Amino acid sequence: MVALLTTPAFAQSLPYHSDPSAREILPSLSPVPAIRFLTTTDFPPFNFRDAGGELIGFNVDLARRICTEVNVACTIQAWPWEQAADALADSQGDALIAGLDMSDENGKRFDFSATYLALPGRFVTRSADIATFDATALAGKTIAVRAGSTHEAFVKRYLPGANIAPFANEVEALAAVQSRAADLFFGDAMRASFWLNENLDCCGFAGDAYFRPAQFGEGLSIAVPAGNDAVRHAIDWALIRLKENGTLDELYLRWFPVGFY
């Protein structure tokens, strides 16, 4: 159990790594004259409207860069979240970039691109305690978690000597660390990064990132209608290229000033 905490699986410092076995040759784009991206407006900093009503965000920038990379025309249309998946299934778009869950149910309707942003679990502690953080010495420490989350289950399994303090959501759990009601937080690193961005004088990430796709989720991917291999292959090829030329990292650093890797 200790080994699982000292050497997190697939720990990495960047949001995406190209699969070395992935195709290096751009697929034929003759069936892909354009990519019609669908997204939503309710998921900042990924996709949302600014004060002027313009659609912006990490996903919006990524969609445009994908089209530029494969040199095809690009449109990005916003839909209400509850209608976006059905719109894609009804061929009102070619790809949905809005964090659609890669569930078994969605897998029956859609195919998914390679993951472009993984979602690790991470510890957060007060700034003064970061330098002395030791993942193997947490017995007796109080760890705040979101009640009922897979992160809570992770702590119960691998840190049986720790005291668990469950909260209704990540914000309350992180606030407990800030107020010293808990020694640490363990949970979704992306959500924690949003909170840390507003509380930089208080706390920070400690230790390494823990990648457990089966527990914490497979990350963010782009959905396409089932069987639309031409668009999916083009997107996958573009993601590889955008990682290799530094664009993906540039977008990550722009939209996530407090990185969660």
Image (cartoon, grey):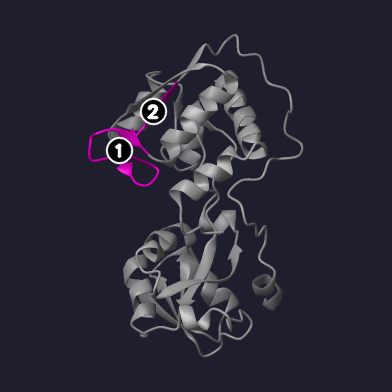
Q: Nearer the viewer, residue 229 or 249?
A: 249
Figure check: 80 above or below 92: below
Please say whether residue 45 is one of the residues in the magenta stretch. yes
Q: Amino acid at mark 1?
A: Thr
What quarter of the picture does the C terminus occupy? bottom right
Pinpoint residue 103: horizontal percent, then vertical percent.
48, 43
Residue under the point 23% across and 35% down: 52
Determine which residue is flagged by label 1. 41
Within 10 angstroms of label 1, few (less than 14), some, or many (20 or more) residues?
many
Please say whether residue 144 is one of the residues in the magenta stretch. no
Q: Is residue 207 left or right of residue 151?
A: right
- Range drawn in magenta: 36-56
Figure check: 13 above or below 242: below
Determine which residue is flagged by label 2. 38
Figure check: 81 above or below 45: above
Residue under the point 52% across and 54% down: 119
Q: Is residue 255 left or right of residue 24?
A: left
